[in-house]
Image (tube, helix red, strand yellow):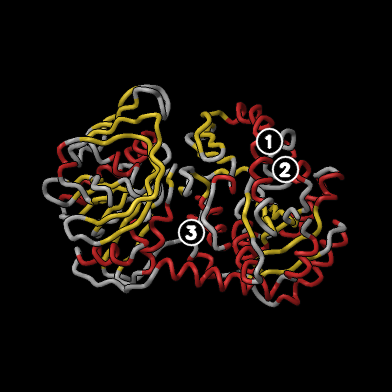
Amino acid sequence: MPAKALMIQGTGSDVGKSLIVAGLARAFTRRGLSVLPFKPQNMSNNAAVTEDGGEIGRAQALQARACGVSPCVDMNPVLLKPQSETGAQVVVQGRILTNAKAREYQALKPRLLSAVLESFDRLKAKSDLVLVEGAGSASEINLRQGDIANMGFAQAADVPVALVGDIDRGGVIAQIVGTRAVIDAADAAKIVGFIVNRFRGDPSLFAEGMRAIERHTGWPALGLVPHFAKARRLPAEDALALEHREARGNGTITIAVPVLPRISNFDDLDPLKLEPALELLLVRQGEALPGNADLVLLPGSKATIADLHALRAERWDVDIAAHLRRGGQVLGLCGGYQMLGRVIRDPDGIEGSPGETEGLGLLDVETVLTPKKSLRGVEGESLPGGDPFAGYEMHVGVTTGPDTARPVLRFGDGRADGATSADGRVKGVYVHGLFSDPRQRAALLAGFGASSSGVSYEGDVEKTLDELASHLGEHLDLDRLLTLAR
């Protein structure tokens, strides 16, 4: 028998769709059901590598983990990775298809529906329940024609929809009632109920609010979900989440992270928040890098050259030079590693017009961007200490030069990764996920004369998923949701 399916759509971006799907996935999996996550179209620069050698949105990887399965490309068949204010890289079933401006993508969408439905059917064939996540807002009627992310998919696949509104941002009654007012009758009929998320305070005070939404929409209330504070301990997908995640601590070691416009895979930072000895500072545009930082960490970027220009526009290059004169250290991850070299060459126009850009010159290396993308899980040991690690590669480009003779990592197959400056104070690597391993965090802290907490980041994620599932189970009627699934 084909699996049942239920779609979680939202009144807007960052209303908690991803988290609710993850929590429901773990809750229904704990009941013994075979559950799989699905998101037809995603826009995110925080991606994950799958076992089948593709890439999907980070949220779907977390949701797969909540289901107790390995992520696969069918869980997110269309992934858009923004490279500019108006254009994005289009990844279909794990592989780069093209780059497209926003208007070009609108014309492309109808051709992608077959791939979306194909992936969805494959997931249905091997599960009891598929939990589908929408994208952005269900009320984007300007994008309804050719839609594959929200109601367009729900209609094509005949999947019922639960609509989520976020009371924490205010105006949740208008969010949900407004959605009912603007969508057409056929789409409204797909919605089987609504959920109000992120409530704070006495729920009895919003009982009339729930009834008012029911009266104005004709949709039944499926639950009022209190704010789940521990959500910050789970990997976030949308860069919007960085606005709500002040990564400040009280440690004696300060790590400063410039938040670049096209920052990617920023969940690399999450394990560092577990260390009491660290103070992690996210430095926004318009702010200077702090003069007391021990380490400046340059994160990954979806558009390295554009973010390098942005870094210079903020004068962060001047701050980094001053930081090094004071004896500080610098670590670049992936795109941040590429920025640290002498030059970045883009002969094929991977990131825009063909050409080359001068790097920060802090490592004696150069990078050539190439069409072929490295996507794979890796493991090995860090150098020179031999501490084990596991992570993944997700990048375009090949980096070479004298400083690669002092690599940072050695993979299990003998290959080396990364580069170190002659004085040892500047390092860069391509591998993401390094600090998920407590031994890598311990090695980092030891370099500054501090000790690690030894907390397991992976264990903390698992515990938080279980707590999220219990939280949703307490405030949503899971039996009713299963009945509504079709």
- Residue at the image point whose x is 40% and y is 67% from the top: 457
Q: Which residue is mark 2?
A: 153
Instruction: Check contact, mark 3 vs mark 1: CB within 8 A.
Output: no
Q: Could you tell me which secondary element the residue under label 2 belongs to? A: helix
In three-dimensional space, the C-alpha distance between marks 1 and 2, rounded to whole angstroms, equals: 8 Å
Q: Position of residue 361 (x, y in %)?
A: 21, 37
- Residue type at mark 3 is Pro
Compared to residue 230, the image places residue 124 above or below, namely: above
Res. 480 image quadrant: bottom right
Q: Could you tell me which secondary element the residue under label 1 belongs to? A: helix
Residue 296 located left or right of residue 232: left
Q: Position of residue 297 (x, y in %)?
A: 30, 52
Residue 334 located left or right of residue 136: left
Residue 417 located left or right of residue 7: left
Please state which of the two labelled residues, at mark 3 or mark 2, is closer to the viewer. 2
- Residue type at mark 2 is Phe
In three-dimensional space, the C-alpha distance between marks 3 and 1, rounded to whole angstroms, equals: 28 Å
Q: Which residue is mark 1?
A: 113
In three-dimensional space, the C-alpha distance between marks 3 and 2, rounded to whole angstroms, equals: 26 Å
- Residue at the image point whose x is 79% and y is 47% from the top: 158
Q: Which residue is mark 3?
A: 235
Would residue 377 be visible to someone looking at this image? yes
Instruction: Check contact, mark 3 vs mark 2: CB within 8 A.
Output: no
Q: Position of residue 78 (x, y in %)?
A: 59, 40
The mark nearer the N terminus, 3 or 2, is 2
- Residue at the image point whose x is 32% and y is 56% from the top: 256
